[in-house]
Amino acid sequence: MSDQIVIKGISAKGFHGVLDHEKRDGQTFVVDVVMEVDLAPAGASDDLADTVNYAEVAGDVVGIIEGESLDLIEAVAERIATAVLTRPLVEAVEVVVHKPEAPVGYPFTDVQVRVRRERETPVVVALGSNIGESLETLRHAVVALLGAVDIDAVSPVVETDPVGGPDQPAYLNAVVVGTTSASPRALLRFLHDIEHVHGRTREVRWGPRTLDLDLIQYGDPAFDTDVRMDDAALTLPHPRAHERAFVLVPWLQADPEATLRVDGGVRRVEDLVAGMDTSGVRPGPEGDLLDDSW
């Protein structure tokens, strides 16, 4: 389980309930929120950008309590959980909605609904290798990704000419499409751990490597849920993905409906591929990188 940020007893007046007087007169609702967040970066940096602003979360909760009248506190809890999970660093959330003035008809101290929701965010990960047994390396990397990504599709392997950097052998590339409950930074660390296991070093920019795992996109730009961030550790979406045929061609094979945010607008990957030179991308070795045996 990740570290936690806990906010208890957020109180506001709302008009939720199935009875007429509940919607007319309102009553007090109390909410507890437990967010699972990796707090190590914030502990090291002492920077608010590396954690979740709990004052803003409390404001979101009050806004939902005081907002649209709903019949059930189950619906109130679901809306709060959904709102909290829009924050990229939150990996999971537990929400408890208390209704201490509920019209139960018998002596009681509290009525509460408790829900727990995990992030299920679409992600795109690009894989590449041009040192050693590259095909086997890609296969092992895809299996390792199952530790953090629920994989929906894996592209065929393509062979590609190197782009930039020193003279080096051709690459084998592929793209994985799936969903994750990990935050962007937690997923990036997971990818780096897989690279490290396979002997990846970062001595030469765009140089040859045993394994390269790039987080291309986190979220879905078609629904405006993609994360846009730019810091020293991670830029999303990947700033050069729209220029790279060795990413876009296999991505399109894995997901024909794929979209990517480019310069603030949302573009179909199919259209991006149609407008670029793909002569440096060829079919690679046959065979699935992830089969039923795993």
Image (cartoon, grey):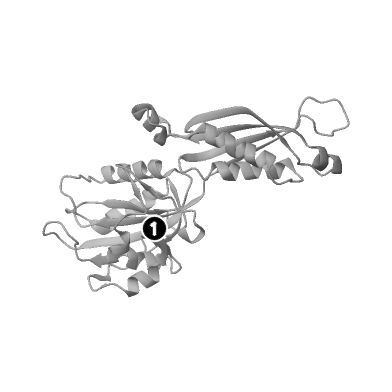
Q: Which residue is mark 1?
A: 176
| Mark 1 surroundings within 10 Å by alpha-carbon count, few (fewer than 14), some (14 through 19), many (20 or more) | many
| Quadrant of image for the C terminus | bottom left
Q: Residue at x 59, y 39 (%)?
A: 60
Q: Residue at x 40, y 50 (%)?
A: 228
Q: Nearer the viewer, residue 171 or 46?
A: 46
Element on which disc 1 rests: strand
Q: Position of residue 253 (x, y in %)?
A: 39, 68
Residue at screen point 25% across, 66% down:
159
Q: Position of residue 260 (x, y in %)?
A: 40, 61
Q: Nearer the viewer, residue 190 or 100?
A: 100
Direction from residue 250 to residue 256 in the image, left or right: right
Residue at (27% x, 59% y) in the render: 135
Residue 286 drawn above or below residue 5: below
Q: Position of residue 143 (x, y in %)?
A: 38, 51
Judged left or right of residue 18, residue 233 is left
Q: Is residue 273 above or below residue 181?
A: below
Q: Is residue 123 left or right of residue 209?
A: right
The quarter of the displayed image where residue 32 is located: top right
Q: Nearer the viewer, residue 188 or 80?
A: 80
Q: Amino acid at mark 1?
A: Val
- Relative side of 166 to 174, left or right: left
